[in-house]
Amino acid sequence: MLVYGRNVAEEFLKNNKNKIKKIIIQEGFDDKNINSLLENVNIPTYFKKRYELDKLAEGVHQGIILDVMDYEYYPLDEVINSDMEFIVMLDHLEDPHNLGAIIRTSEAAGVDAIIIPQNREVQINATVMKTSAGTLSKMKVCRVSNIVQAMDKLKKNGFWIVGTAMDGEDYRDINYDGKIALVIGNEGNGMSRLVRENCDFVASIPMYGEVNSLNASVASGIMIYEVVRNRK
């Protein structure tokens, strides 16, 4: 998998050098921190002109592209049979920028793991990696074939499932003590019917202006930090 961007490159070079297969750098690359890190690695490195990097990257590469091993998803059982207490579940998100932003917020807030469905959901790719600003390497992401079945397993292991929707109860009135799995729905349609029916609580963020909904990653940030605030 090709990933790009200076933040992502720096994170890999600091903490995941063993996952880098090769490095492609723009001629004249002048990032002192990254160039310093490159002095201590024994990885095939190629210097190319900017237009050659432009052809490889689907977005802004900032002069550096890494060819890395594909992301290794964590088994759900490893999450369930651990001491994790705060998990974020994503119900068929489609925008890789939203997924990357949620991963970044989750890592910053100390979320233990993220669960995504295997089908009809954006998967880990270069855009997700770049949007997460390299924090993906520090976050456990599980991929499951059936999100409702995953919810059931979490419930049996002591988790309360808190979904999010426009018509739920005020998110500030919910008790977030104990083990929490926070569910974020699809950008356009929200949570699917079966997912909603299997939630213990459904939280809603009040809207006071003319806009009646928030971007999925923005709503996730509000909800994640509300859980963290209550638990502290």
Image (cartoon, helix red, strand yellow):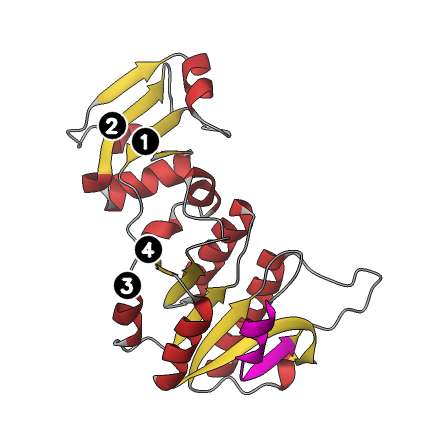
Q: Are marks 4 and 2 in contact (CB under 8 Å)?
A: no
Mark 4 neighbour class, 10 Å CA radius: few under 14, some 14 to 19, many 20 or more: some
Amino acid type at mark 1: Leu
Reading the chain from its start, which is encountered first: label 4 or label 1?
A: 1
Check disc 2 and report the residue beneath it: 22
The vertical placement of 152 against 41, above or below, is below
Check disc 1 and report the residue beneath it: 66
Check disc 4 and report the residue beneath it: 138
Q: CA distance from mark 3 to mark 2?
A: 28 Å
Q: CA distance from mark 4 to mark 2?
A: 21 Å
Q: CA distance from mark 3 to mark 1?
A: 26 Å
Q: Single out the mark in the foreground, 3 or 2.
A: 3
- Name the image quarter holding residue 216: bottom right
Lateral position of residue 123 relative to residue 9, left or right:
right
Q: CA distance from mark 4 to mark 1?
A: 18 Å
Residue 92: % across, % down: 53, 58
Residue 154: % across, % down: 38, 78
**Residue shown at the point (81%, 69%) measured from the top left:** 208
Q: Are marks 2 and 1 in contact (CB under 8 Å)?
A: yes
Q: Are marks 3 and 2 in contact (CB under 8 Å)?
A: no
